[in-house]
Image (tube, rainbow, N blue to C red):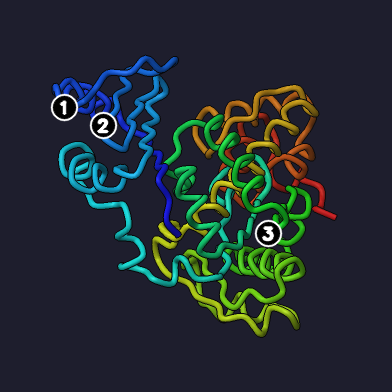
Amino acid sequence: MNTNSFTFKLTKEQQHALCQLLKSPKYLPENVPHTQVAVSIPDGRINLYNSGKLLVQGKAAREWITFTLETEILKEAMLGYEDFRDPEAIQPHMGIDESGKGDFFGPLVIASAYVDEDLVGKLRELGVRDSKKISSDNVALNMAREIRKILGDRCAMVAIGNRSYNRMYTKIRNVNKMLAWGHARAIENLLEKVPGCPRALSDKFGPTHQIERALMDKGKKIKLDQRTKAESDPAVAAASILARAGFLYALKTMGKKYDFEVPKGASDKVRREAEKLVADKGPGILLDTAKCHFRTTDKVLAEVGYSRKDLPPAT
């Protein structure tokens, strides 16, 4: 797909370097609201917004990005080279990724996203990348909304809430097997919407056969790939952002229900919030809010005067 509009998210250092570069007389200054600098070149326009987003448009956009932006500011080749390194990235396929696996509070969310060449072009214009490289929750939530507009019905999500998660873990005792089950469901759910999808790609977290065994009739016909750093693939990157947004929404809902600000991760701050929650509502609240196989559970319960035997069964 050919496009004449590209966006990039620049670091503070890159923004400063670009502002200096665009002071050259060969760039014609323009007046564009909410920009640090805006210039035009023959057959092109370059806008650096206050947010750090860079928008390059016009027939000359690709040439300027390749020979100026990448060499002098980004210091890496990005535009167009993805398709040479991984030609399958623009072929019809789905990506699967998860969020919440390492967080004490909140569910495990798995999302799947379908792409083809046209959709990949639109996702790249949006600046879609692995959600782990997006530091702002608001950016991830806004980008997820835009991704859903682009993909329409060609995405799916599976959320394993905390009580279900704890019940599953009690039976399975293996997070990777639970993750494989969630990936398989996300694949099956998307195949209901895009039955002709030939391939599914996810990050490698365990043996491929774990997912294959969990697939049902529709999923057994799909080619399943796993690889390290799969988030560089546009479909997996889109799924990564959708999953993170789903996880963030779940934390907000949980916070409203139980009247506390739910922190992410498994830090000391998380433990302190969990201790206050258990002190107020009793140990059983962890079954509905946390992943109880985390060692954090033992520390929280001990601090408030309980032990794991005080946890009711996750039924």
Residue named by callout 1: 26
Q: In this view, does 208 lie above or below 112?
A: below
Instruction: Please name the amino acid that badge 2 sits on.
Output: Ile
- Determine which quarter of the picture holds residue 245: top right
Q: Where is residue 244 in the image (x, y as percent from the top left)?
A: 58, 44
Disc on res. 41: 2
- Determine which quarter of the picture holds residue 31: top left
Q: Do the residues labelled 3 and 1 touch (CB within 8 Å)?
A: no
Secondary structure under tag 1 reads: loop
Q: Position of residue 249 (x, y in %)?
A: 69, 36
Q: Which of 37 and 239 is in front in this view?
A: 37
The residue sitting at 36% across, 32% down in the picture is 54
Q: Work out which quarter of the rendered image holds the C terminus and state it.
A: bottom right
Mark 1 closeness class: few <14, some 14–19, many ≥20 residues within 10 Å: few
**Mark 3 or 1, closer to the camera:** 1
Q: Are marks 2 and 3 in contact (CB under 8 Å)?
A: no
The answer to whether residue 183 is left or right of residue 74 is right
Q: How far separated are the C-alphas under marks 3 and 1?
A: 44 Å
Q: Residue furthest front?
A: 42
**Mark 2 or 3, closer to the camera:** 2
Disc on res. 154: 3
Q: Which of 265 and 296 is in front in this view?
A: 265
Instruction: Please name the amino acid that badge 1 sits on.
Output: Lys
Q: Is residue 301 above or below residue 108?
A: above
Whether residue 104 appears in this view of the structure is no
The answer to whether residue 72 is left or right of residue 255 is left
Instruction: Please name the amino acid that badge 3 sits on.
Output: Arg
